[in-house]
Amino acid sequence: MRGPDEWDGRGAPGGPGERPRIPSPRSAAEDHGPLPDPPPATAGRHPQHASEPEETGPGSASEAAAEPASRPAAAPAARPVPASPAAPASPPPPHKVLKSLLGAWALAACSTEETAAVEAHLTDCASCADEALRLRDAVGLLHPADSLDLDPLLRSRVLEGCLGRRPARIPVPDWATPYDAEAAKLDALLRDMGESEWRAPVRLRWFRGERPVERETTVAGVIGHLMTVDGLVASALGLPDPLGCAAPPGTPGPTARTESYWQAAGEAPSPLATHGPWRDQSHALIRTVSFAGGSVGELSVPYGEFRLPLCDSFLDRAFECWVHAGDIADAVDYPYEPPAAGHLHQLVDLAARLLPVALADRRRAGLATPPQRLVEAGAPGRTLHLEVEGSGGGHWYIALDSPAALGSPDRTVAHIALDSAEFCQLAAGHVSPEEAAAGQHGERDAIRDVLFATASLSRL
């Protein structure tokens, strides 16, 4: 007695109990190379009889082919065209050659045929596949994804390195370097803009009295404004006034000069009429003060209702160049970096030194609280401690009772802490005084008066 799993030989082929056989799966014909060409229609005839006529008598093959009658007659076969013999497929390169190509493949330096051979080999060879993955990872480390934009401090670092090896025969004054750097940054932004972006609307903001003011122009209009106000410094140095005959009479301030320029050039001056002349004028300003020597920094520059020394005028122009470059960058959706830390400190220092005079002007206009006591010139009086944090920050002590008084830490009655970027935005009129200070302590009236005085430093 056999068990159910024991074979008795009855299922052998041809036996009485032959079991049905299930064939194993077969691979597709195309997996073994190109398919053979189909046989010609006259393959059953000998070539030497190809031109002989077919037999048409009774019992001939043609008659047999016509049966049954319902089957449609076959169309006459066309004369076959002999196919050219297929070229034999070249064998793939050996393993040693393909392994030597992995480095070039990872760098995408292989030809099309080599790439196909390597990638076909990687599907069969595990060791080469692991090596290929390691090479691809190494190539990714050799080519990090960097921004295409140049570092805004690259120019300063290159110049510093060059001047460290060989000092400039005619150096640029320290108080003119922020303007030189900011003008170069703005020039790079303008060169990267298209024709249509010069007509993009730009919103200019500043602070007047107790409220913010806005004015809309174009990118070309902003550059014309910068060129016109830079003309105040140019005229003080004996350089040509960019307004020419269109300059208003007397000693007009920045706003009156800008309005005159916009009226003469139209609301949308062309890029060619603004970019090149503005950049040429900025170069001329830097060259002139560099050749003039250090004493030229005390030259007075009229700004209409007030005057500034030439050294402070260059810092003022650097500050406005940076602020309006940011306005342009916002209008065309372009990233823009603040000034270098050393330059930003000079700009913050200028604003802090101007605060006592701005506070006195607001008192005369009835916009600030009157001083609590009179202080002699040069004597210490009530003081506000202004702390500016971050890049370019520092500590300043602002005299509250008189522009001629001396700010002293011992007489501090209030303290304000702001970030350097926030303080500059407040001085540019881009931030409300009520929302600017991050930390406040002390007399509320003194804090409010200084914050509004900072905002009043802004202008068109």
Image (tube, grey):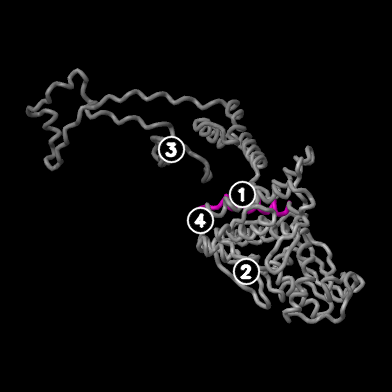
For numbered disc 1, what is the local secondary structure? helix
Give yes or no for residue 188 being in the magenta stretch. Answer: yes
Q: Which residue is mark 2?
A: 205
Per the model, the C-alpha gap separating discs 2 and 3 is: 80 Å
Label 3 vs 1, first from the N-terminus: 3
Q: Quadrant of the C terminus?
A: bottom right
What residue is disc 3 on? 26
Name the spot of residue 278 as percent of width and height, x first: 60, 53
Is 91 placed left or right of 437 in the picture? left
Which residue range is magenta in the image? Answer: 177-197
Rendered image: mark on residue 234? none
Distance from the alpha carbon under mark 1 to that under mark 2: 27 Å
Give neighbour class at mark 3: few <14, some 14-19, many 20+ (Cα, 10 Å).
few
Closer to the chain start, of discs 2 and 3, is 3
Q: Give the spatial CA distance, label 4 vs label 3.
A: 76 Å
Residue at the image position 66 percent from the left and 56 percent from the top: 235
Is disc 2 surrounded by few (<14), some (14 to 19) or many (20+) residues within 10 Å? many
Q: Earlier in the sequence, mark 2 or mark 4?
A: 2
Number of numbered discs on residues: 4
The answer to which of marks 4 and 3 sits earlier in the sequence is: 3
Which numbered marker is on residue 270?
4
Q: Which labelled disc corresponds to residue 280?
A: 1
* Residue situated in front as seen by the camera: 131 or 347: 347
Q: Amino acid at mark 2?
A: Arg
Mark 3 or mark 1: which is in front?
Answer: 1
* Vertical position of residue 220 compared to residue 67: above or below: below
